Image: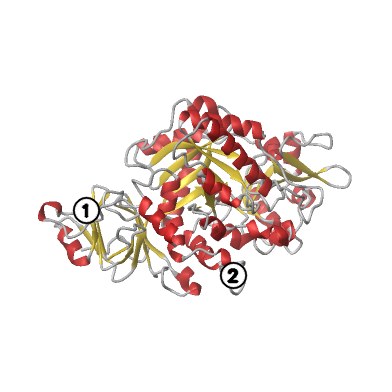
């Protein structure tokens, strides 16, 4: 606990307001009073009132003192005991993927391949012949027969449209015959490096493509327009604000999408702060020469200061790189999507240019390779306070758990993945390897912090699901009783920090956001229930009432557009 307190003190800014002098109490634009305020600031963990002026917090303290900031034009909101938190941060998500998922065929929650076919056929019926039909969200682990399908039934139901359906984790796809033909995939097509074409007993492609094999089809899908990218971003940020999210880490973005983000930031169209990670492919090296950029467009809405690289695939599609074979598929130990040599090239460039390096690693082999590369690159080019990250860090060999703290590497983990995966993970990797699987407490006890998130749209972006999983190790239905390996749980204070202050630190913006502290941006969220004190089984009853970004109310539900004077 002492190490957690020390971490809190480092993350917090000194100087939370005390009794304000008259010269400091010019009217604020927005004042909340009579609230249960959890600040995520160790210098003043609790308060009753918050005032925001010109987008930034100017006061944190008692309701009596907060009233001094109310003027004729102030929007005063009496929360009547409701909970006020710092704006919530999702450190790892995919904005355009979420937007596309909202605009394309939603396959989340489907319980069979047949139900997928029904949804796709319905969309095809209203789509001109020959145009692509795309969807996302299937998970064969949730089907009554948890096996990859064959495309035949899909091809028969939708013969006149090429179909591309992404698995929930984004690391596998199902396509129909028209898509296979468009891509020129047949029995003679070799597996690409870092990918697999699943084949039937006759050697024919089944339509299931794993990791880099997905690119064989993606390359023939028509590019989206800049206007379509903008529409996806707008749809996504509206949904994210609804969940109380005010900042995100966009994990792997191409140059054209970054340009659209920049246009929107300059035009004042962003309602969420985005710490973009440049995708580690294509013309990455020429882009890095521009150097890290923070506060693009002003108002702290956009930064491009990190790189995202994928070292392996996902556990659900057996693409995560393991030190030993999968327990339920002997002979398969997963895939490396880039070579260690390529990752080292990128690490050297990141160290040279000042970019943060965030690397996707799920399997224990993938995580070990990343740690080895990080260690070698940083030994050659030491970077003080580099804050390089491992994204996911789901399966760690016990010998590698302390290495993150030793190297100053931040694990960026999605607690909701544990709640979603725990029912089938033991079959994938066997019980012996479970000690280092979703090992939050083991990591925290070494002294690291954990940046939290959801990996949306792989999971719901709702941060309350992540908070609940972090403190219970259960799914939303409360299973299993007592939690799955409950010794790895976070405390509620840690769960709040990993969705606020720790996420800000992991994005190198802790001076601007992450806690309710005077001087930081006025990013706030109002909840209907006090998630810090209610029983575990009532955490998910909490609803977001209002989301505020830089003092601007970007979402409100039951309080309506008013709630003020």
Residue with the mark numbered 2: 483
Q: Nearer the viewer, residue 379 or 106?
A: 379
Which residue reaches farthest right? 202
Q: Is residue 349 left or right of residue 41?
A: right
Residue at 53 percent of width and 29 percent of height: 349
What is the quadrant of the C terminus in the image? bottom left
Looking at this view, name the residue that lies furthest to the left.
22
The residue drawn where x is 18% and y is 63% is 65
Q: Image check: 537 left or right of 12?
A: right
Q: Position of residue 156 (x, y in %)?
A: 77, 49
Residue 149 screen position, x and y as percent: 77, 53
The disc at residue 29 is 1
Q: Residues within 10 Å of mark 2 (few under 14, many from 20)?
A: some
Please state which of residues 366 and 220 is positioned toward the viewer in this rendering: 366
Task: Name the disc covering residue 241, or none.
Answer: none
Residue 31: image quadrant is bottom left
Q: Is residue 501 above or below residue 280?
A: below
SS for tag 2?
A: loop
In the structure shown, which secondary structural element does the residue marked by tag 1 occupy?
loop
Distance between the Cα atoms at labels 1 and 2? Answer: 44 Å
On the image, the x and y values in percent for residue 457 come to 55, 51
Query: In this rendering, is residue 401 above or below 45?
Result: above
Q: What is the quadrant of the N terminus in the image?
A: bottom left
Count neighbours of disc 1 (C-alpha within 10 A) and say few if under 14, some if 14 to 19, many if 20 or more. Answer: many
Labels 1 & 2 near each other (Cβ < 8 A): no
Q: Nearer the viewer, residue 521 or 210?
A: 521
Q: Of callouts 1 and 2, which one flags the residue occurring earlier in the amino acid sequence?
A: 1
Residue at the spot 38% in from the left edge and 36% down from the top edge: 294
């Amino acid at each position: 606990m002492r190490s957690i307190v020390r971490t809190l003190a480092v993350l917090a800014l000194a100087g939370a307001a005390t009794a304000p002098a008259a010269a400091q109490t010019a009217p604020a634009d927005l004042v909340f009073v009579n609230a249960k305020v959890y600040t995520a600031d160790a210098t003043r963990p609790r308060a009753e009132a918050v005032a925001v002026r010109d987008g930034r917090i100017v006061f944190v303290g008692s309701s009596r003192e907060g009233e001094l900031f109310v003027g004729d034009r102030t929007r005063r909101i009496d929360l009547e005991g409701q909970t006020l938190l710092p704006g919530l941060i999702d450190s790892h998500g995919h904005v355009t993927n979420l937007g596309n998922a909202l605009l394309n065929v939603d396959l989340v929650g489907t319980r069979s391949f047949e139900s997928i076919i029904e949804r796709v056929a319905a969309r095809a019926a209203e789509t001109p012949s020959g145009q692509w039909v795309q969807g996302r969200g299937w998970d064969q682990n949730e089907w009554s027969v948890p096996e990859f399908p064959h495309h035949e039934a899909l091809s028969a139901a939708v013969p006149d449209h090429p179909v591309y359906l992404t698995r929930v984790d984004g690391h596998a796809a199902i396509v129909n015959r028209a898509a296979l033909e468009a891509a020129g995939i047949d029995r003679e097509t070799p597996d690409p490096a870092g990918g697999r074409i699943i084949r039937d007993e006759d050697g024919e492609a089944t339509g299931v493509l794993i990791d880099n094999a997905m690119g064989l089809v993606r390359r023939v899908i028509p590019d989206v327009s800049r206007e379509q990218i903008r529409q996806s971003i707008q749809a996504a940020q509206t949904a994210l604000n609804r969940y109380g999210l005010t900042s995100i880490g966009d994990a792997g973005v191409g140059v054209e999408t970054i340009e659209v983000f920049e246009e929107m930031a300059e035009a004042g169209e962003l309602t969420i702060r985005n710490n973009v990670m440049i995708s580690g492919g294509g013309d990455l090296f020429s882009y890095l020469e521009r150097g890290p950029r923070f506060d693009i467009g002003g108002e702290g809405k956009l930064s491009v200061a990190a790189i995202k690289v994928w070292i392996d695939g996902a556990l659900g599609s057996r693409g995560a790189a393991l030190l030993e074979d999968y327990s339920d598929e002997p002979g398969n130990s997963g895939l490396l999507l880039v070579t260690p040599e390529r990752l080292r090239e990128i690490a050297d460039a990141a160290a040279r240019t000042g970019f943060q390096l965030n690397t996707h690693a799920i399997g224990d082999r993938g995580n070990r390779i990343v740690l080895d590369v990080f260690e070698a690159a940083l030994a050659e080019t030491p970077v003080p306070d580099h804050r390089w990250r491992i994204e996911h860090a789901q399966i760690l060999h016990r010998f590698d758990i302390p290495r993150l703290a030793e190297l100053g590497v931040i694990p960026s983990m999605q607690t909701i993945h544990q709640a979603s995966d725990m029912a089938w993970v033991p079959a994938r990797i066997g019980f012996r390897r479970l000690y280092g699987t979703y090992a939050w407490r083991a990591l925290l006890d070494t002294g690291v912090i954990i940046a939290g998130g959801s990996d949306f749209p792989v999971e719901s972006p709702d941060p309350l699901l992540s908070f609940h999983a972090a403190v219970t190790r259960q799914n939303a239905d409360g299973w299993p009783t007592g939690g799955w390996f409950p010794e790895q749980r976070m405390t509620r204070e840690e769960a709040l920090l990993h969705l606020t202050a720790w996420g800000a630190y992991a994005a190198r913006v802790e001076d601007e956001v992450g806690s309710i502290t005077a001087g930081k941006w006025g990013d706030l969220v109002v909840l209907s229930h006090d998630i810090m004190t209610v029983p575990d089984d009532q955490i998910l009853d909490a609803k977001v009432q209002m989301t505020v970004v830089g003092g601007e109310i970007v979402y409100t539900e039951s309080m309506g557009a008013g709630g003020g004077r």
